[in-house]
Image (cartoon, rainbow, N blue to C red):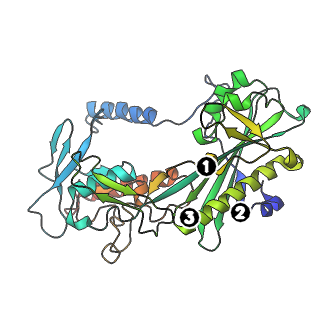
């Protein structure tokens, strides 16, 4: 989809082949698919730390399941504007850190981290935490076009492309993940296709593959950023709510700039399906889902907007956004050291730190931020500075 045809996609900046979220480690793998999953590496780290602890070369990693963190308490006698967290209140009891040498790292989602801080810090984060709320809208368009049988393989085939673009007037970004699937055997291929596709949003179903044996099915997941400059989108503390883990109010109000990007993303997505279909553009059909049943049908008409526009927001960001000048930026919550305003031994990582969401999937950026924080804490620990807890 790159090269000279890119100019046929409205507002597109570039297109490239998209890697699938699977990778075989050997030429003859024991499994038909291999996706990354967090529990595997986490449990491996747990086992490694146990061995290091036995040899007195490290500390064990404790994992608490079925535990809800409610809030933490700051010391009342700390000097200066920042204070240390000395207790952590959880559903399984209270943890105490009287020497203030234990770090608390908030690696939860944007909303839970914001809720925890508004319940714990108070005045230093007033009118800051939750004052900004952004994220992505998600569109989902499924199409198909006929293809010459002789050019199709007898086995399951999957390919993917990535298209990135932006609304020129606002510079707001969108991207389109186009997954192309061909199956000669829908009954047996549908499950494998779901596992091998990059993610749920780009997977198809057995129902869509049935009757499409002589077609290429396109699953388009389109994401666009919501403007972070929107005073009508926020997360606010609600002290009257009895549950401290959910005592916030949340509001997302789409701006006119957001709506213009919606319309542009719609048209760019349909442009992408036309490019993929090539000479078969006039034969494209779109999947129409019956809103009152789990069935659907193919039609030459585009699916209704209310069907392709997924309700709600995904990848919530910016509620505790990071700033390089925390005091002058009066709505920012976290400095470049990852510490929330008013805290010494509390750190934040994750999407809540993003000043703006962009359109890309945030996972790798969040991983990069977490690694940067880990590096900084490791360096501080090695230096043994009195200004930072170990």
Q: For the point 65% across and 72% down, which residue is it?
A: 168
Determine crowd level at label 2: few under 14, some 14-19, many 20+ residues with C-alpha closer than 10 A: many
Residue 25 appears in the figure: no
Which residue in the protein does label 3 denote? 258
Foreground pick, 128 / 378: 128
Q: For the point 84% across and 32% down, which residue is it?
A: 214
Percent x, y of residue 351: 43, 55
Label 3, label 1: how far apart the Cα atoms are: 16 Å
Under circle 3, the secondary element is: helix
Foreground pick, 222 / 25: 222
Q: Residue furthest left?
A: 77
Q: Nearer the viewer, mark 2 or mark 3?
A: 3
Q: Residue furthest front?
A: 292
Q: From the viewer's perspective, is residue 22 above or below residue 115? A: above
Left or right of 68: which side holds 132? right
Of mark 2 and mark 3, the one earlier in the sequence is: 2
Which residue in the protein does label 1 denote? 306
Under circle 1, the secondary element is: helix
Residue 357 appears in the figure: yes
Foreground pick, 230 / 176: 230
Label 1, label 2: how far apart the Cα atoms are: 24 Å
Foreground pick, 52 / 278: 278
Which residue in the protein does label 2 denote? 12
Find residue 119 and name its label. none
Percent x, y of residue 260: 61, 66
Of mark 1 and mark 2, the one earlier in the sequence is: 2
Left or right of 36: which side holds 162? right
């Amino acid at each position: 989809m790159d090269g000279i045809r890119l100019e046929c996609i409205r507002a597109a900046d570039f297109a490239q082949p998209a890697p699938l979220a699977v990778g075989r480690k050997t030429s003859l793998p024991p499994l038909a698919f291999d996706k990354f999953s967090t529990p595997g590496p986490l449990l491996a780290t747990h086992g490694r730390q146990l061995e290091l602890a036995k040899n007195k070369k490290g500390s064990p990693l404790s994992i608490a399941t079925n535990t809800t963190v409610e809030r933490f308490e700051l010391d009342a006698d700390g000097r200066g504007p920042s204070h240390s967290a000395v207790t952590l209140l959880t559903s399984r009891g209270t943890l105490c850190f009287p020497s203030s040498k234990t770090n608390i790292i908030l690696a939860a989602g944007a909303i839970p981290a914001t809720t925890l801080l508004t319940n714990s810090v108070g005045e230093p984060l007033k009118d800051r935490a939750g004052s900004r709320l952004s994220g992505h809208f998600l569109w989902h368009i499924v199409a198909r076009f006929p293809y010459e049988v002789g050019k199709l393989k007898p086995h399951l085939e999957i390919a993917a492309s990535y298209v990135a673009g932006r609304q020129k007037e606002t510079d707001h970004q969108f991207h389109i993940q186009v997954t192309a699937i061909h199956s000669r055997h829908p009954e047996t291929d549908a499950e494998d296709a779901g596992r091998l596709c990059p993610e749920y949003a780009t997977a198809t179903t057995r129902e869509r593959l049935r009757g499409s044996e002589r077609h290429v099915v396109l699953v388009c997941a389109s994401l666009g950023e919501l403007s972070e400059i929107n005073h009508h989108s926020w997360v606010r503390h609600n002290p009257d709510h009895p549950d401290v883990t959910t005592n916030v109010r949340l509001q997302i109000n789409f701006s006119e700039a957001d709506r213009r990007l919606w319309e542009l993303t719609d048209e760019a997505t349909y442009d992408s399906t036309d490019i993929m279909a090539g000479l078969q553009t006039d034969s494209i059909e779109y999947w129409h889902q019956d809103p009152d049943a789990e069935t659907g049908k193919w039609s030459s008409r585009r699916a209704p907007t209310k069907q392709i526009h997924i309700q709600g927001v995904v990848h919530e960001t910016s509620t505790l956004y990071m700033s390089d000048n925390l005091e002058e930026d009066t709505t920012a919550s976290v400095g470049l050291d990852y510490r929330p305003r008013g805290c010494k031994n509390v750190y934040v990582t994750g999407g809540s730190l993003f000043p703006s969401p962009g359109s890309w999937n945030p996972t790798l950026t969040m991983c990069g931020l977490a690694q940067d924080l880990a590096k900084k804490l490791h360096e501080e620990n090695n230096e043994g500075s009195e200004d930072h807890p170990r």
